[in-house]
Image (cartoon, helix red, strand yellow):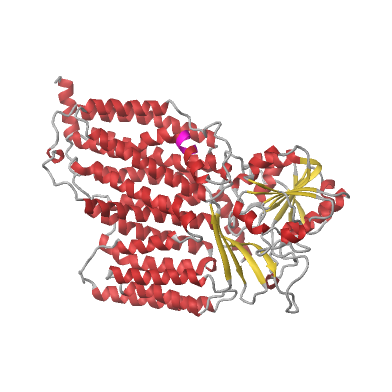
Amino acid sequence: MSRLSTDLSAIGRGGTLVLWLFTTAVLLSALLLFGVQPMFARMVLPQLGGSPSVWSVAMVFFQSMLLAGYAYAHLLTQMQRRWLAVAVHLSLMVGAALMLPLSVAKGWGNPPASGTALWLLGLFTISIGLPFFALAANNPLLQIWFVRTGHRDSNDPYFLYAASNVGSFLALLSYPLLLEPAFSLHTQGWLWSGGFVVLVLLIAGCAARMLCSETLPEHLTETAVAKPSWLRIGRWVLLAAVPSGLLVAVTAHISADLTSAPLFWVMPLSLYLLTWVLVFQRKPTFSHQLVLLLQPFAVAWIAALLYLGNRVPVLPGLAGHLLAFFIVAMSCHGELARNRPAPADLTSFYVSLSFGGMLGGLFAGLLAPYIFSWIAEYPILITLAVLCRPKTSNRQNERLFWLTTVGLAAALIVSGYVLANLPNVTARQLDISVLGLAALSILIMRDTRKSAVVVVLALTTIHLSQTREGHTDSMRSFFGVHRIYETADKRFRILEHGSTIHGAQQLVADDGKPWVGQPRLLTYYYDGGAIAAAIDAIRASKAAPLRVAVIGLGAGALACRIAPEETWRFFEIDPIVIEIARDPNRFSFVSKCAPDLPITLGDARLTMSAEQAGFYDLIIVDAYSSDAIPVHLATREAMAIYKSKLAPHGAVVMHISNRHLELKSVVVNIAAANGMQSWAWNDPLFGINLGQMMYPSEVVVSAEQPEDIGSIAKSDRWTLTAPDTSKRVWTDNYSNIVGAFWRKLMLSTVHQ
C-alpha cells in the first residue's frame, strides 16, 4: 500500500477528521431524508383534497422505502469485495441525483374514486422513490463503513444513529417553522437538490476512508458474538411497530381536528425521532426506569383525553396527546436501545427496526381505515404498548411509586368532577368511571397481562360511551370518520366529521310531534344567517334564477336553498358523504328538496377545472376536513379557478368558520390577488341559538364590483375588508399555517 493509503488508514483509525466526515454525512443524509417527507407530501396534497390520510399513506410509503433501503444496505455489507459495494452505492446515488429537482410525476392522472391509497403510493414511488431509497440506505451503510475504518469509537457506532435522528429532528422542525413560511415549494425543491449533490461528495469521501482500512476490526468478525435468536428479532420488530403505528394514529387524530398540513405532521414525527436520539446517546438523558415509571401515567392520560374529546381546549389537548405519545415511544425505543446487538449485527438490527416500523405504519395507515369504522387503532396500539413493557420484579422506590400513583389517580378523578360541573360541559358519571379505570391501570401496571386487560376495558368503555346520545351509525373513508347520532332528547340527528358537526336535522317539532314536510335548515344554514343572507342578496341582485356551484356537500342542507328553475351542482370528494346525504333514512334534505341533485365526485380543484368557463353566478366554498378548510382550496390559484367559472357579475362565498385557524385575512388576500373585493360577515352571533342547533359562522363574499353582490355592499352586517399587505398571499407553493394558528390564538385571547 502506498504511503498515502497508510496515512489515511491511520487517520481513519484514530483521527477526528473521519469522525467529522461520517457524522456530517449521516446528519446531512437524515436532513434530506426527513426534509423531503413533508415537502413532497405538501406537493401532492392539493390532488387529494387536503385529507389528513395523505400523510398517513405517505408515512406508509416512507417506512416501506426505509425497509427496502435498510435491506439493500444489509446486502451490500455482505459483499466480500468492499470496493464493489462502494461502486454500487455511489452509482445509485448518482442515478438518483440525475432525477432532480423533485417534482410530482407528470401524466399520473387524477386520483380514482376508490383505491386512493394505492394510487397515492404509486405516485410517491414514481416521483421520489429512487432518491428516497438511496437516502434510506445511508444510515446503516455509513455506520458499518465507519466501523470498518477501525476508528477508536467504531466498537459502538450507535452514536451515529443518534446523530442521524438529530438531523431528522432538525429537518422536521425547520420545515414548517422556517422553510415553508419563507420559500415556495419550487425553491424548496432546488435547495433540497443542492444538498443531495453535496451528500454524494461526502459519501464518496466516507467510502475512500473505509477502503483505506487494511484489516477488518475484531468486533466485526463472525466469531465475535452469537447471532440474535428469532425470538429476540421478533421483539425488536414489535418494539419498533408499536411507536410507528402510534405515530400515524396520533398524527391522524391531530390533523383531523386542526388541518392537514406540515406543521401538524411534523410535531409527532419530531418527537418520535427525538426519542431515538435520546435513547441511543452514549449517556442517555433520561433513565429508562424513569420512563417506564411514567408510561402508565401516559396511558391513563391518553384514555382520559380520548374520552373527553373536544371538551378539552385545543392547546392542552394537543400538548397532552403529544407528551403522552413521547413517553410511550420512549419506553419502547428505550427497550430497543437496551437490547441492541453488537456491531456485527448492526444492519440486521436496523432491518428489524424498519420492518417493525413498516408493519406499524401499514396497520395504522392502510389497514385500520378499512377494518374499523372508528379510530380504533389508537387505543389498540396503546394497549400493545402496555404489553411491550419488560417483566420486572424490581421494587425499588416502592413508596415513591405508590405515592405518585395515588396522587395521579386522585387528580384524574377530581378533574372529572370539575369538568362535570363546568358550564357547557356534558361530562357525567361515565366520565368518572372511565377516568377511574384509567387510573386503576396505573395501580397494577407492574403486572403486564392484568394491566393490559384494564387498559382494554377503559378504552372499550371510551368507545362505547360515544353511543350514549343515541349513536346510530359510524362510517370511515380515506377522508375521515363520519358519525351519525341522535341527541339525548331525540329531537335532532347529527352528522359529525372528526369532532365537528357538519349537519343536523330536526326530527321532532317544538310541539313534540314528528317533523313533517321540508326539513328545517339548521347549523350554519339557518334563515338570517350569513350563508343564507349571502345567497338571498345575490339572488335578489340577479333578479333571475341562479346557477350555483357548491364545494362540499355535508348532510345536503343547502339543497333546500334551491329556488325554482335554478341550476345547482355540488362537488364532493368523499363518496361516503354522498351516500349519507342521499339516504333519506339518515338525512332527507336532498331527497325532499332536490332528489335529482347533480353531485360531482372528486376533488373540486380538479373537477371544477373541467366545468364551462363563465357559467356560474355564485360559487359557495363550504368544504371541510373536520374543523379545517383544506389549504389548497384557499390559495390564489384556487380563487383564480373559481373566478374563471363565474359569469359576469358573479360572486364567491367562502365559509371559513374554524376553531383553530384565522382564515379571513387569507381569503381576502387571495381574492385581492385576483382583482376581487371582499366583504366579511361581522355579526357571527346574529340569530344563533345553540339549543336549536343554529351556530355562529364566519363567511367572506368576494366579487369584482360592489353592485355584483347587491344589498351585501350596503348592509351593516357586512364589512368591506381591505387586503392585509403585511401578510404574504397563500399560493399552491406557499402557505403559513403557523401564522394562521397564531392569529386565531391571539384573537381568542383578546376576546376572552
Residue 729, given in percent of the width and then of the height, sits at 63, 42
User: How many numbered tags mark residues here?
Assistant: 0
Residue 625 in sight:
yes
* Left or right: 485, with 62 as reference point: right
Is 453 located above or below residue 173 in the figure?
Answer: below
Per the image, is 4 magenta?
no
Residue 382, given in percent of the width and then of the height, sits at 38, 62
Residue in view at x 68 percent, y 68 percent:
693
Residue found farthest to the top: 2
Main SS of the magenta part reads helix
Residue found farthest to the right: 543
Residue 467, given in percent of the width and then of the height, sits at 54, 71
Is 311 located above or below residue 591 in the figure?
Answer: below
Residue in view at x 25 percent, y 38 percent:
143
* Left or right: 308, with 687 as reference point: left
* Left or right: 519, with 468 as reference point: right
Residue 673 in sight:
no
Is 258 located above or below residue 69 in the figure?
Answer: below
Residue 499, given in percent of the width and then of the height, sits at 56, 62
**Range covered by the magenta-colored residues:** 123-127
Is 717 located above or below residue 356 in the figure?
Answer: below
Please tell me in which quadrant of the rendered image residue 486 appears. bottom right
The answer to which of 732 and 475 lies nearer the viewer is: 475
Quadrant for the C terminus, please.
Answer: bottom right
The answer to which of 679 and 479 lies nearer the viewer is: 479
Quadrant for the N terminus, please.
Answer: top left
* Left or right: 525, with 384 as reference point: right
The answer to which of 268 and 282 lies nearer the viewer is: 268
